[in-house]
Image: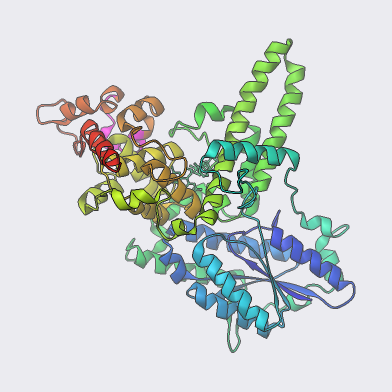
Amino acid sequence: VSALMWFRRDLRLHDNTALTLLLEQVVQASQHTESCLQAVFVMTPKQWLAHDMSISQVDLMMRTLTHLTNDLNHKLGMKLSVLQAESYSDSIDVIEAFCVDNHITHVGCNYEYEVNEQQRDTALAKRLSKLNIKFNQYHDQCILPPNTIKTGDDTLYKVFTPFYKKWQQTLQISPPVLYDINSLAEGDIKQKLTNLNINQASTDTSSTQNTSSTQHTSSTQSIKDSHQSVLQRFTSHYQLSENNAETIPVLESARAAYPAGEQVAIDRLNSFVQQDIEEYSLTHDQPALMGTSHLSAYLTLGIISPRLCYLTANARLESKSFADENLVDSESELEIFENNSKGDVERWISELAWRDFYRHVIVDRPDIVKGAAYKKDTDIKLNWSYDNDDFQAWCQGMTGVPLIDAAMRCLNQTGFMHNRLRMVTAMFLTKDLFIDWRLGERYFMQNLIDADFASNNGGWQWSASTGTDAAPYFRIMNPFSQAKTHDKDAIFIKSWLPELKDIPANILHDENKLRKALSKQGAFAHVNYPLPMVEHKQARRYAIEQFKARG
Ligand code: FAD
């Protein structure tokens, strides 16, 4: 057996379904015949740009490849070949050529659920089958894979809550089991693999190979070179800077906040679950605090396993109940204690379920991946605005609404935005400015380090009231009262809008007071900050009328 592991959005060794199952197959085969396992990653910069990938995400992906290369080498004695292509269709040629050049008999990878990705894999499967090469795909991105949680009528749940109930019940009956590469061999897996000659084909240490049909990079230095060239490409595409990609603020910030490598992500999970999760219900809606896990970028690129996240949090639930029994005196105290801590952990687990839910949705409705609204009638009847000035004011954080502007400037400078603020800014764009949600969805994809098609689309359609289990169209968030509730002392606002540092929070949280304060006769007329670009009450009325007129 000569097998090939194709890494995509699963850049890790732990609990990697395809990697473990391929290894298992190869270990078994090697007892009878010489066998080997190689690994590839295919760079497709043109496709990534066509999919609006953000520069901070491509940077994290490339940084992670260096770690993956080292981990594969140190833990399994395997080499990662980084192949160069442009688009997904080129990647099919590149994989095929690699297989031919390296006498590959089996290719394995984990499923990607979006439409272009599925088309690519179907086309590759056909090509490989003509060459008698086996192609196997595995579910790996979710805790419970798409199509597994369905109603009694075998259809997808249209609302999250019943989906979540069934998801929980299913997991209680059969919790996920983590794939562990170390369990494949007694003792040291790397030694075992070496003894079995499994990695024979991967001992070539040349840094760059050019064969007749494929070009690949294998040393960490060459990955660094590819990293630089991809960054330059993204820099010019997004017109970020004339000169050096290294000095782009969003990259500097993202590199500090998101170090690469699966161990960093696992450590972050463990420390979050041991400490911060206890306060999750209290703190997760406060953008000024680090109250959430900040694992999304790692989950999106598959640097951490979602099943590991679930099991770690679930174990915390169980250990919490056990420890509390020894801490509290009365049964009622125990119940209160348990409910509180359970509430926090369960709340966090439910966020992981949202991630699964939105993946179920795009598999059920692939037209959504091509830009359709979940509620099809909203595409026909809603007269969305495409006003570019309004849109640019939103993108640049120049709307005159402090919470919106602080959130957008935070996104532009760090590549991250807090969940509450994603909802508020998305509602502002789609309801106060009545701009097509697809423009905002695209802007988020282009700027978020954790950009993920299914979750982003789900969040946008929720906010625009066009999606599954969407916010009812008449329940429109007021960005001023949202600021009052979730950023009471305006700490978050002032950290991103220093020009507002002297304006008291009670003024910033009140549209009328703010307009007055910033007006020519106002106490803060000298402050260089725009007046709110729309009057929220009026804008709200207009949006509701539009939805009502839809019938
Ligand atoms: P935590 O609160 O620690 O949650 C743990 C994990 O659960 C997250 O890492 C994430 O994987 C998942 N999760 C949490 N909330 C949601 C949710 N509402 N939907 C789906 N999964 C969730 N999330 C993305 O990962 N990528 C996106 O591109 C994305 N775009 C969004 C756009 C909009 C308009 C909205 C409203 C939400 C979006 N989300 C997206 C969901 C959510 O905002 C982020 O997952 C969360 O802010 C990430 O921070 P965290 O890792 O600290 O989350």
Q: Farthest residue in the top direction? A: 330
Q: Is residue 495 left or right of residue 102?
A: left
Asked whether 22 or 448 is in front, the reply is 22
The x, y position of residue 117, in whole percent, is 53, 66
Q: Height in image: 448 above or below 53?
A: above
Asked whether 77 or 5 is in front, the reply is 5
The x, y position of residue 361, in whole percent, is 52, 50
Quarter holding residue 327? top right
The x, y position of residue 141, in whole percent, is 61, 54
Residue at 22% over, 48% down: 390
Residue at 43% over, 34% down: 287
Q: Is residue 500 magenta?
A: yes
Quarter holding residue 112? bottom right
Q: Which stretch appears magenta?
A: 493-504
Q: Is residue 37 left or right of residue 50?
A: right
The answer to whether residue 295 shows anywhere in this view is no
The x, y position of residue 497, in whole percent, is 30, 38
Quarter holding residue 205? bottom right
Residue at 45% over, 31% down: 286
Asked whether 57 or 123 is in front, the reply is 123
Q: Is residue 448 magenta?
A: no
The answer to whether residue 411 shows anywhere in this view is yes
Q: Height in image: 423 above or below 327?
A: below
Q: Farthest residue in the left direction? A: 521
Residue at 61% over, 83% down: 97
